[in-house]
Image (cartoon, helix red, strand yellow):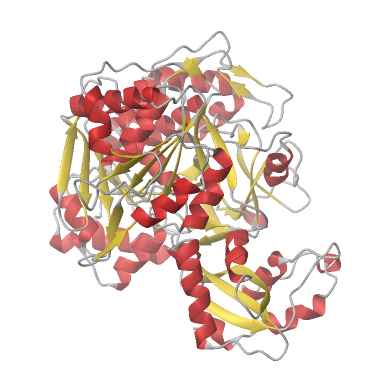
Amino acid sequence: MQPLWTPSPERVAATRMDQFRRSVGQADAAGLHEWSVRQPGEFWQELWSAGGIIGEQGDVAFDPGDGTVLGGRFFPHGSVSYAENALAVRAGAGEEAIVAIGEHGERRSYTWAQLRAEVAALARALVIDGVKPGDRVAAYMPHVVETIIAFLAANAIGAAFTSTSSDFGVAGVVDRFGQTTPTVLVAADGYRYGGKTFDCLPRIAEIAAQLPSLKRTIVVGVLSDQPDVTAIANGVGWVEHIAPHRGAALTCLRMPSDQPIYILYSSGTTGKPKCITHRALGVLLMHVKEQQLHCDVRAGDRVLYFTTCGWMMWNWLVSVLVSGATAVLYDGNPAHPDASRLFDIADSERLTLLGVSAKYIDSVHKAGVRPVATHDLTALRTVCSTGSPLSEEGFRWVYEAMKPDVHLASISGGTDICGCFVGGDPTLPVYAGEIQGPSLGMAVGVFSPEGQPLTAADGKGELVCTVPFPSVPVGFWGDTDGSKFHSAYFDRFPGVWAHGDFASWTERGGMVIHGRSDATLNAGGVRIGTAEIYAEVEHIPGIIEAVAVGQEWDDDTRIVLFVKLQEGLVLTSAMEAEIRSRLRANASPRHVPARIAQVTDVPRTRSNKISELAVADVVNGRVVRNTEALANPESLAQYTARPELAV
C-alpha cells in the first residue's frame, strides 16, 4: 500500500517529535516508543522538562508498585497546578488566549491577560462561596469561554471540576452531579443550535432543587445579558457575582500529583453513570505529550476541536493553553448555516490544528464539500479525527478534497483515560484506514480472549495496555473499595488494562480500531451507556423491557433499540415517537436510537442478566461469544435479518 502522505525531511526536522527524539538519543520512531515504555520514569521525566511543565517533580519519577498497570505511580511526591500551567506566560504565545465563535456569528476574544484576570476574579468569588480544596465545581454549559474560566478558577483553588453539556435533560444532569455533590453549579441560561434557541432556566431551577449540596448557582447569560435567576435557589448572575472581585490577584494552589482535577462521566449497562476521577498531573502529562509531540502543537498555534462540554475532547482542547497555543471554540451546529462552517473558521482564524469526529468527515464528504478549492488553509498543519474509526474513504477525502500536505492524525483513546492509546506521528507516513501507531509511553497491545498477544497476521482482538501510564484514573467517585473500577478495566486480564475496543495491528506497525467489544454504545463518537436508555424507556406504559446495542453502519455506529411489549401490544409509530421524545428530553439527543424494533424475548445469561453482547454480535453479523452462558440462546433468532435494520 502506498502512503497518502509522507512528510519531507525538512518538515520532519521541524517537528517537536523529531526534536524530542534526537534530544533523548533515539535513532527512530520505533526506538523512541520502545524506550518510552521500557523506561517509563526516564521518559516522563524528559517529557516534563521538554514540555515546559511547571511544578515540583519530587524525588521519584516512577514507582512501579506491584508491577501492574494499576499499581504504578508517576511523580508520587510531586505537586502541580494545572491552572498555573495553563495561564503561564509562554514565549511565543500570541496575544489571544481564547477565541469563542457562536453559531450566529458573534466572535469574542480573550487575551492572556484578560483570561488570567477573569480566572482570578471567579476564583475569589468561589472561595467566598465556600469552595475549598477537594470540593467539586460543576458546569452545565455550552462550549463558551465561561466554561473554561470556571474550570481554571476551580482548579486554581484546588477544587475538582465536572461538566456536562447544556443539551442534557434534568435527569441526566442529576444522575451525574447528584453523585459528585458539587458545592457550586455554573450554568448557562440557554444555548443555540441549528438556528434554534433553547431556554435552560427552567431546567436549571429543577436541577438546583435536586442537588442539596449546592451553596451557589451562577447563571451565565448566553441568551440574555441579565438572565432571570429569581426561580433558582441561591442563584446569581455571572457578571454581578464576579464584578466585586475584579482586580484580585491570581494565585494557583499546587496540589499533590494525584489530586483529582476533574470528574468525567461514562454511563454503563447498569446503574447510574460512572464518575471517572482523573488525577491532575496525569492528564497534564498526557495532553502535553499528545499535543506537543504527536500533534506538533507549538506556542502561537491556533487550535479548534469541535466538541461539547460533555466530551473528553473539551478537556483535551483546554490543554492547548499549556503549550501557549490559542484555543478556538465553536458552539453550535457545525453544518449551520452550511456544511462548510468549520472550514470558514479554519480559514478566517488561520487554524493550525482542526479536530473533528470521523462522522463529521464522512458527512462533509457526502455533502460534496471541497475546501481545497474554496478555502485558504495554508496555515493548517494538522487534522485530528476521533470518536469512531475513520474509513479509508474518509482518509482519502482529507487528502484529495481538503489539503494534500496536512498531517492527518487519527487518534483513539477514551473518557476513561482522558487521552489516547494510539494516535498520529508527524514524522511518519499516513496510510489510508489506519492509525499511525501507539502513543509514546503507552504499551499498547492486542490480546486474544485467552490473553495472548496477537500480531498483524492474527487479526482482531482486545485493545489492552500492559504497563502503567500517568492518566490511569484515581478511580470512580463513590466507589470506596475500588471494586467497580477494577471490574471495568482489569477483570479480563489481571494487571492489564482492557479498554473494551476491538483492534488489530497492521503490517506497518499501525493499528485499526474496529469498534466496541463491550456493551458500551459509541454513536457518533460519543460513548453512551445503555442504563440511561433503559431508565427512561421502561417507564413508558406497555414496555416490559428493552435491549439497546450499537450497529456498525455507514462507517460509524448507530443505536438500535429492541423493545419487549406487554402481550397483545404492537409497536406503533406513536410509541416510537414517545420513546424518542422521552430520551431526548430526559437524557440527551445522543441517546435517541436510530432504529426501534419489537421482539418477544430478550436473551439473558444464566444469572438473569440481559446479554447485550450477544445481541450486538448478532446484529453486526459476528459469531456470538459464549452462547453457553445464555439461558435462552434460541431468543437470538429473532434479532437476525430484521428488515428495519437494513436501512
Residue 326 x, y percent position in the rendering: 24, 35
Residue at the far top: name it: 59
Residue 345 x, y percent position in the rendering: 19, 52
Kindly tell me whether residue 51 is visible in this rendering: no
Left or right of residue 305: residue 182 = right
Of residues 45 and 221, the one nearer the viewer is 221
User: Residue at horizontal 51%, vertical 35%?
Assistant: 30
Left or right of residue 31: residue 124 = left
Residue 566 x, y percent position in the rendering: 70, 83
User: Residue at horizontal 20%, vertical 49%?
Assistant: 101
Residue 164 x, y percent position in the rendering: 44, 48
Query: Is 68 rendered above or below residue 234?
Result: above
Q: How many marks?
A: 0
Instruction: Pick the quarter of the image with the N terminus.
Output: bottom left
Of residues 172 and 421, the one nearer the viewer is 172
Kindly tell me whether residue 317 is visible in this rendering: yes
Of residues 371 and 81, the one nearer the viewer is 81
Left or right of residue 21: residue 375 = left
User: Residue at horizontal 55%, vertical 26%?
Assistant: 35
Query: Is 35 rendered above or below residue 461?
Result: above
Task: Determine the image quadrant of residue 202.
Answer: bottom left
Left or right of residue 161: residue 343 = left
Task: Determine the image quadrant of residue 271.
Answer: bottom right
User: Residue at horizontal 26%, vertical 50%?
Assistant: 330
Of residues 250 and 503, the one nearer the viewer is 250
Residue at the far front: name it: 230
